[in-house]
């Protein structure tokens, strides 16, 4: 593991700080208030190579490692958790699934569009009644000649409405058969596919979440990813990598909350001193700073293992579990440090807290991370 940032990481971080000043900070409150998904801003990030960060150049990507990927997601998370979630989900879920498990023809067809941001990706595993218990999904695909007919619905899908293409996990075998789920690539506009935006979320409101409905959606066998029946295991592997994304985003939110808290506590005076001078506040900042660094180290550990194609199920879960809880803690402390101001939308603290909370829920709850970790250490 390298504790020093590479030149590429430094360059990406600086580029994103500049980008955030012009393209994110002036608009993010409006996106949050209106639950507006800034697809044009996503496309600009695509122009910067940030929508195919670890996709090789031969498929139109930036060809970076998970280190640069984590840095990019952290930097966006420091500013806007919602946009950060969209960037993370696009890279590691939809696009990542086609890259890691798709055929050469599928990679050539989809990755250049996705890696440049011409197309936005969705990834659909969860259903209304099956979140943590993904294996019990009810959406089915039945073979008819060379085609498959898909019926059912998927819930809580990032870019389920605006995404140009979705990787959809569907039952093709018996209930509870770990070889009974298959991944399909389904393009927007396919007859029988519709979607409804989910509104009134607590946080990550700039990221689009939708329900996708499949009513006799016909797709050809060319749209199956990998072997029929291999979808659940593909999904588990994608979630292992996805946990680096959410850990990175959590680190970004936590660091954003810490930096805002430091700034505020140096400016705010009470009892004749800046409140940073009081141990009650200084120790909060010390705890926040220590846990943000620890979360980043766990995240870069998982990234190192992924870069080196080493097993990282446990380490991905460590990073996601710890960093997401740290993000909530830092968001909460930021509100506390800013007091009444922290409780209003005039200051950034309450948004960090709202955005952070999703980190302990999406892409596997904290409880599921503990299931994964305990199974690994008890093997
Ligand atoms: N990589 C590859 N294969 C994996 C795997 C991984 N990380 N984790 C499990 N598998 C395989 C197992 O080896 C098993 O294979 P066999 O049946 O051939 O032995 C199969 O997948 C089923 O695994 P398991 O029996 O552990 O499945 P469970 O139903 O008990 O589920 C958990 C395991 C809870 C870990 C899984 O359902 C999970 O991750 N749930 C959370 C899903 C989630 O994150 N949802 C949110 C998505 S929002 S984008």
Image (cartoon, rainbow, N blue to C red):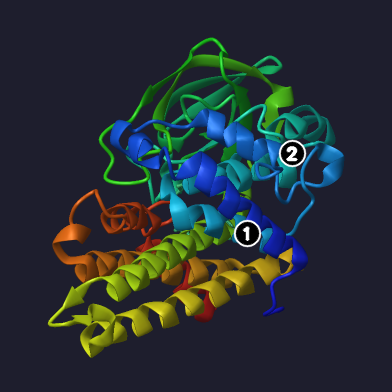
Q: Splitting the image into 4 quarters, where does residue 145 fall? A: top right
Residue 168 in view (yes/no): no
Q: Residue at x 37, y 84 (%)?
A: 286
> Can you give x and y, in whole percent of width and height, for residue 297 in the image?
56, 77
Q: Splitting the image into 4 quarters, where does residue 196 fall? A: top left
Query: On the picture, is 125 further left or further right than 201?
Result: right
Q: Residue at x 61, y 32 (%)?
A: 43
> Can you give x and y, in whole percent of width and height, for residue 104 in the image?
84, 36
Query: On the picture, is 264 further left or further right than 115?
Result: left
Q: Nearer the viewer, residue 346 or 70?
A: 346
> Can you give x and y, in whole percent of width and height, for residue 106 in the image?
77, 31
Q: Is mark 1 within 8 Å of ligand 1?
A: no
Say which element carries label 2: loop
Identity of the residue furthest to the right in this view: 58
Q: Residue at x 31, y 70 (%)?
A: 329
Residue 198 in view (yes/no): yes
Say which element carries label 1: helix
Q: Is mark 2 within 8 Å of ligand 1?
A: no
Q: Residue at x 63, y 48 (%)?
A: 234
Quarter of the figure that contains the C terminus: bottom right
Label 1, label 2: how many angstroms apart (C-alpha)? 30 Å
Mark 1 Cα-neighbour bin, 10 Å: few <14, some 14–19, many ≥20:
some
Q: Which mark is residue 23?
A: none
Identity of the residue furthest to the front in this view: 272
Name the N-terminal-most of marks 1 and 2: 1
Label pair 1/2, CB-CB below 8 angstroms? no
Mark 2 Cα-neighbour bin, 10 Å: few <14, some 14–19, many ≥20:
many
Q: Which residue is mark 2?
A: 102
262 w.r.t. 335: above or below: below
101 w.r.t. 314: above or below: above
Quarter of the figure that contains the N terminus: bottom right
Q: Which mark is residue 13?
A: 1
């Amino acid at each position: 593991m390298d504790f020093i940032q590479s030149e590429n990481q430094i360059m990406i971080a600086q580029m994103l700080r500049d980008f955030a000043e012009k393209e994110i900070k002036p608009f993010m409150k409006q996106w949050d208030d209106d639950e507006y998904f800034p697809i044009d801003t996503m496309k600009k990030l695509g122009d910067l190579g940030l929508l195919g960060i670890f996709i090789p150049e031969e498929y139109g990507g930036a060809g970076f490692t998970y280190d640069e990927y984590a840095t990019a997601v952290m930097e966006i998370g420091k500013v806007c958790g919602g946009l950060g979630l969209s960037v993370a989900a696009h890279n590691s879920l939809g696009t990542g699934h086609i890259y890691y498990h798709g055929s050469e023809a599928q990679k050539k067809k989809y990755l250049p569009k996705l890696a440049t941001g011409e197309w936005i990706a969705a990834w659909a595993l969860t259903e209304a009644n099956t979140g943590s218990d993904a294996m019990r999904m009810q959406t089915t695909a039945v073979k008819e000649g060379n085609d498959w007919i898909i019926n059912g619905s998927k819930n809580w899908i990032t870019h389920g409405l605006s995404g140009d293409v979705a990787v959809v996990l569907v039952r093709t075998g018996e209930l509870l058969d770990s070889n009974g789920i298959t991944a399909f690539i389904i393009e927007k506009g396919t007859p029988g596919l519709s979607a409804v935006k989910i509104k009134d979320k607590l946080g990550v409101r700039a990221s689009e979440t939708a329900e996708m409905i499949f009513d006799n959606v016909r797709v050809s066998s060319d749209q199956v990813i990998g072997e029929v029946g291999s979808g659940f295991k593909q999904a588990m592997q994608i979630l292992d990598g996805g946990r680096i994304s959410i850990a990175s985003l959590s680190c970004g939110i936590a660091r954003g909350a810490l930096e805002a808290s430091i700034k505020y506590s140096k400016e705010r005076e009470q009892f004749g001193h800046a409140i940073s001078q009081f141990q009650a506040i200084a120790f909060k900042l010390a705890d926040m700073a220590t846990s943000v660094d620890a979360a980043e180290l766990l995240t870069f550990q998982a990234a190192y293992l992924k870069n080196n194609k080493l097993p990282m199920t446990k380490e991905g879960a460590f990073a996601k579990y710890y960093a997401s809880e740290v993000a909530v803690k830092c968001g909460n402390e930021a509100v506390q440090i800013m007091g009444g101001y922290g409780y209003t939308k005039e200051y950034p603290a309450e948004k960090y807290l709202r955005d952070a909370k999703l980190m302990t829920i999406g892409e596997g709850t904290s409880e599921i991370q503990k299931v994964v970790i305990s199974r690994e250490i008890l093997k």
